[in-house]
Image (cartoon, rainbow, N blue to C red):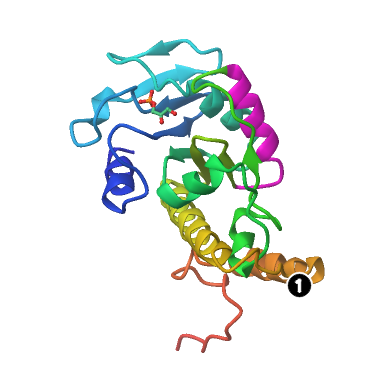
Amino acid sequence: MVRTCREMNATGINQGTAGNLSVRLGDRFLITPSSLPYDRMQPEDLVEMAFDGTYVGNRRPSSEWRFHRDILKARTDIDVVLHCHSVYATTLACHHKTIPSFHYMTGVAGGTTIRCAKYATFGTQALSDYAIEALEGRLACLLGQHGQISLGKTLESALWLANEVETISRLYVQALTLGEPPVLPDDEMERVLEQMRRMSYGQAPDLDGVNDVARPKAS
Ligand code: 13P
């Protein structure tokens, strides 16, 4: 988790003490502490929380523990919640823009759009409720006038998705300078989504059986 947070800042999708990260730990979860710079953060600074919001550890949990808790509770398909303030995703979020299927990679978040959640004050239950709503059937969403959330089964996949969301956001901001771009039709996005599911697209190049390229049998 410490490495992933540092990587979040090193790759440029986050800065300072913005953003936070959680990982499911059986019937509890680990979450980053609030307001501690990632380059100073050590594994023992991580906070262990129960789903009722009680915690153990030397530090205060992230102010966003409610949406981490609620997402981990609602979404048994994932084990990692990553939140960051990546610049292009947040630029779109400042305009409350949903990302449409103007490019096939919008599909990496699991649907034909990447929704933007309504604005609510950071750390509140309302923000958590809006995030859950925007994440329905998706692995990522924007947070109105705030940032983005990306989910994953692993730290690696959540970080990968957060970077993809940032790239697609950047493309969308750039495409918008020439006017609202056309969107791919739903039947094409269905094919894209099916293909992405079948190939675990972009995430598992080393695993056997996740790509549709015929491989020669090992002798
Ligand atoms: P924390 O330092 O409390 O995690 O807050 C950072 C943040 O991004 C709030 O949304």
Left-right relation of 6 to 29: left
Residue 90 locus on image (x, y percent)? 48, 44
Residue lying at the far top in this picture: please name it: 54
Residue 5 locus on image (x, y percent)? 32, 41
**Could you tell me which residue is drawn at 62 percent across and 20 percent down?**
126
Find the magenta span and give its range. 125-139
Query: Which element is circle 1 on?
Result: helix
Q: Is residue 84 above or below residue 69?
A: below
Could you tell me how many numbered marks the image carries?
Answer: 1
**Could you tell me which residue is drawn at 45 percent across and 18 percent down?**
49
**Could you tell me which residue is drawn at 63 percent across and 36 percent down?**
117
Residue 91 locus on image (x, y percent)? 48, 47
Left-right relation of 153 to 62: right
Write down which quadrant ligand 1 falls in: top left
Q: Nearer the viewer, residue 189 or 50?
A: 189
**Could you tell me which residue is drawn at 73 percent across and 67 percent down?**
189
Q: Is residue 167 above or below residue 98?
A: below
Q: Is residue 122 above or below residue 146?
A: above
| Dot 1 amino acid type | Glu
Left-right relation of 218 to 125: left
Residue 31 lies in quadrant:
top left
- Magenta stretch containing residue 129, yes or no? yes
Predominant secondary structure, magenta span: helix
Quarter of the picture containing the C terminus is bottom left
Q: Nearer the viewer, residue 213 or 127?
A: 127
Left-right relation of 42 to 11: left
Quarter of the picture containing the N terminus is top left
Q: Mark 1 = which residue?
A: 188
Q: Which class describes the residues within 10 Å of circle 1: few (<14), some (14-19), or many (20+)?
A: few
